Image: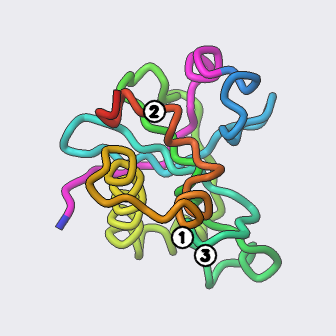
Amino acid sequence: MVEFNSQVYLLSAKFMADYPLASYPELMYKQGRPYTCLLIETREDIFLCVPFRSTINHPNAYHFTGTKRSLKSRSGLDYSKTVVIKDSDYIDAVTPAIVDRDEYSEMMRNISTIAQDVLDYINGYVNHKNGTIPLHPREYIRKYGFSTLPYFDELLGLT
């Protein structure tokens, strides 16, 4: 079983300044729109920020099933857009993160599964990149082709 702490937060303006969208196009923030995410703190003092999204059209995510928004679109938590951070200044601890109550409830009921899935997704990337368990090129593209994880290779111990 994985040990972790989790909360819902926003990424800070400092993160957005240090990771401008022009240089990091796979990040999911837009000017004036917060990057609301499930923040998972691992034992290694690494924070995994998994964003809430209104529509996710791929399997690398936790898809909400019993929520109001999920009945209209495929809303969920997008593992492929996970941000990996160590600097706590990248977390906005002042501005409240607002998520739909039913999505928050479903997330909390499934938090252990979600945390394990996020870690499995990241470990799959790390294992491919370090050659431990290489993926077929098509599977790699399907799973990680539009992922944010390459931006965080150093924090993941890959450089």
Identity, as a three-letter code, of the amino acid under mark 2: Phe
Identity, as a three-letter code, of the amino acid under mark 1: Tyr
Q: Quadrant of the C terminus?
A: top left
Residue at point 41%, 74% (across, down): 110
Q: Along the polypeptide, which appears first: circle 2 or circle 3?
A: 3
Which residues lie in the magenta part? Answer: 2-19
Q: Which residue is mark 3?
A: 64
Front residue of this view, candidates 81 and 38:
81
Front residue of this view, candidates 51 and 124:
124
Q: Which residue is mark 2?
A: 152
Q: CA distance from mark 2 to mark 3?
A: 27 Å
Vertical comparison of 20 with 45: above or below: above
Q: Are marks 3 and 1 in contact (CB under 8 Å)?
A: yes
Q: Residues within 10 Å of mark 1 (few under 14, many from 20)?
A: many
**At numbered mark 2, what does the secondary structure look like: helix, strand or loop?**
helix
Residue 136 included in the magenta stretch of the image: no
Q: Are marks 2 and 1 in contact (CB under 8 Å)?
A: no
